[in-house]
Amino acid sequence: MPFSGRIAASALLSSLLLTVAVSAQAQDSAAAKELQRVQPRIVEWRRDLHEHPELGTHEVRTAKLVADQLRALGLQPRTGIAQTGVIAILKGGKPGPRIAIRADMDALPVTEQTGLPFASKVTGEYRGQLVGIMHACGHDAHVAMLLGVASALAAMKDQLPGEVMFVFQPAEEGPPNAGEEFGAALMLKQGIFADFKPDAVFGLHVWAGLPVGKVGTRSGALMASADEWTLTVHGKQTHGSRPWDGVDPITIGAQILLGTQSIIARQVNIAATPVVLTAGQFQSGVRFNIIPDEAKLVGTLRTFDPVVRQDVIDRFRRTAEDFAHAGGGKAELQVVNNAPATINDPALAQRGRASLENALGAGNVVEMPLVTVAEDFSQYATAAPTFFFFVGSTALGTDPATAPINHSPQFLLDEQSLQVGSKAMLQVALDYLNQPTQ
């Protein structure tokens, strides 16, 4: 190409990019105004959902509220996915990328102790036990914020490039009955992306460990994988006064549990990658003077590296079997992976962080450390690159280090985080959709 032609081509490209930038700024402004307009509705939705929480796969009322609001935006929601999940696709008026934005909908088996005027008084059954039910992890806020983002994007759909799938997912915390699948894996299995292949999937989570106004993220590994393990120790029942006539599964179980901590302290290089192995249940026996036949321990394993994960599981199984054999019993370990590690795609994380800084200012975007909680949002990485970030939810003036953390019955979300989170997610979505075509 002659030099003059290259200059002309360069000028044309610059003009095109400038036009795209100006158009994107206009879209951002229109979307931001709409999001600001619906902020009171976002608060109303969140409070309504908080007062009426539902456990995983039981989010019937929540799903209806979501579907009704999406229909009011002119969308055609598809319901009943993974039992109570809802999706809807917004088609922009211009060509562009496809993205999905996900919010989880389920609450926890926790009895609320916040004293809020809209506090939950709901009870239900969780794995055979009557429990209080509370949005102790902030999923009510996630649903409300995504409805707000959907409202903002729908208001400018004629100028919007690309397509957006809004994913309202059940059972991120898991279903109330053991053995059932978590929501993200089941939605994927039932084909939410069969006819809609996203170029990227975005998600967020409110987080008591950050003050309101701040958001946090990191490239690469962000949250741990979550394994649920069950250890069954088989012994031999006998009278409590004559332990030598039987095999005590409680003592063996205690020895195994202490042995697992030696695995972490002495056999795993936790300087290279964190590992957490925790028992949350130890059940055995019915009477003070009977050594029972069986003991059962249930807990969780958190890792960031699949190779380390398998190594710890192998060591756990060997430790359990060896202690049981030494005591004359038997041990069986079962491990179920509920969620892989949440890993932010590096290229997407770089762009996502720039969007967060654009929305909130660079000083309000913090680098997160590795977080040992888990999220089944990680399942979506099997379909497309993913980007996930945390939204601070602790009120200013309260030290996030001492604030009740997510899953606490005192978990208290500052509602200013609704505006921060929805604004941040809207910017992430708009920036990705408005990227210049190559």
Image (cartoon, rainbow, N blue to C red):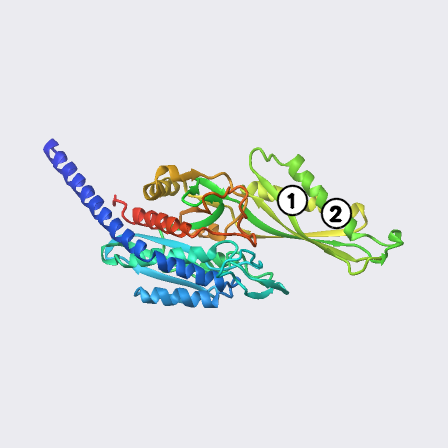
Residue 259's tag is: none
Of 93 and 395, nearer the camera is 395
Q: At 65% from the left edge and 44% from the top edge, which residue is drawn? A: 314
Q: For label 2, count other residues whose C-alpha is less than 10 Å away and answer few (under 14), some (14-19) or many (20+).
A: some
Separation of disc 1 and disc 2 at Cα? 19 Å
Residue 164 image-quadrant placement: bottom left
Of badges 1 and 2, the one in the foreground is: 2
Query: Is the C-beta separation of discs 1 and 2 under 8 Å?
Result: no
- Picture layout, residue 78 above or below residue 136: below
Q: Name the residue under label 2.
A: 254
Q: At 41% from the left edge and 66% from the top edge, which residue is drawn? A: 65
- Picture layout, residue 277 above or below residue 242: above
Q: For label 1, count other residues whose C-alpha is less than 10 Å away and answer few (under 14), some (14-19) or many (20+).
A: few
Residue 111 image-quadrant placement: bottom right
Residue 249 appears left or right of 350: right
Please tell me whether mark 2 sits on a helix, a strand or a loop: helix
Q: At 13% from the left edge and 34% from the top edge, which residue is drawn? A: 7
Look at label 1 and name its amino acid. Asp
Please tell me whether mark 1 sits on a helix, a strand or a loop: helix
The image position of residue 187, as x and y in percent, is 46, 60
Q: Mark 1 points at which residue?
A: 314
- Counting residues from the start of the chain, the first of labels 1 and 2 encountered is 2
- Picture layout, residue 20 above or below residue 62: above
Residue 196 in view (yes/no): no
Q: At 54% from the left edge and 64% from the top edge, which residue is drawn? A: 121
Look at label 2 and name its amino acid. Ala
The image position of residue 420, as x and y in percent, is 38, 48
The image position of residue 23, as x and y in percent, is 21, 48
